[in-house]
Image (tube, rainbow, N blue to C red):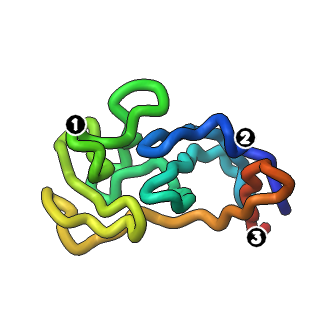
Amino acid sequence: MEQIICRLEEITEHGGISFNYTQCGESREGFVLVYQGQLRAYVNSCPHTGVTLNWSENQFFDYSQQFIQCSVHGAIFQPLTGACVRGPCLGQNLSPLEVKLDDQQLVLILDE
């Protein structure tokens, strides 16, 4: 199953967009970002507490714009791998989502 998330032009470098999707009958939230010219998408859930990561709407990066930072306890994640490099979930990873670019639209690909 595929779901259009947004147009590529809507996401800026170090920017992100959150979106909702349904998988296995459950409503979930994900986010997509651009970092160093590369697209990545993850489930919007901290592996430590399960809370959403964004500080405010579509704000996922820390002040340095180098890392994804959890809004609740400040865990720091590598944008390209989702690996936690500092904080209470050190060694854990964000759950990746598969996305593709199709005619300048970002598309989420889900297994049912």
- Secondary element at tag 2: strand
Report which quarter residue 6 is drawn in.
top right
Residue at 31 percent of width and 63 percent of height: 78
Mark 1 — residue? 63
Mark 3 — residue? 111
Q: Which marked residue is nearer to the observer: mark 2 or mark 3? A: 2
The Cα atoms of the two marked residues, 3 and 1, are separated by 35 Å
> What's under tag 3, amino acid-wise?
Asp
Mark 2, other Cα within 10 Å: few <14 / some 14–19 / many ≥20: some
Q: Residue 102: which disc?
A: none
**Vertical order, 95 against 67 (above or below):** below
In the picture, the quarter occupied by the C terminus is: bottom right
Query: Pointer 2 and pointer 1: residues touching (CB < 8 Å)?
Result: no
Disc on the earlier residue, 2 or 1: 2
Q: Is residue 69 left or right of residue 102?
A: left
> What's under tag 2, amino acid-wise?
Cys
Report which quarter residue 60 is drawn in.
top left
- Secondary element at tag 1: loop
The Cα atoms of the two marked residues, 2 and 1, are separated by 25 Å
Taking depth in this image into account, of 85 and 103 the one nearest to the observer is 103
Residue at 51 percent of width and 54 percent of height: 43
Q: Which marked residue is nearer to the observer: mark 3 or mark 1? A: 1
Q: Is residue 19 left or right of residue 7?
A: left
- Secondary element at tag 3: loop
The Cα atoms of the two marked residues, 2 and 3, are separated by 20 Å
Disc on the earlier residue, 2 or 3: 2
Disc on the earlier residue, 3 or 1: 1
Query: Pointer 2 and pointer 3: residues touching (CB < 8 Å)?
Result: no
Residue at 27 percent of width and 36 percent of height: 71
Mark 2 — residue? 6
Residue 87 at x, y = what percent? 14, 57
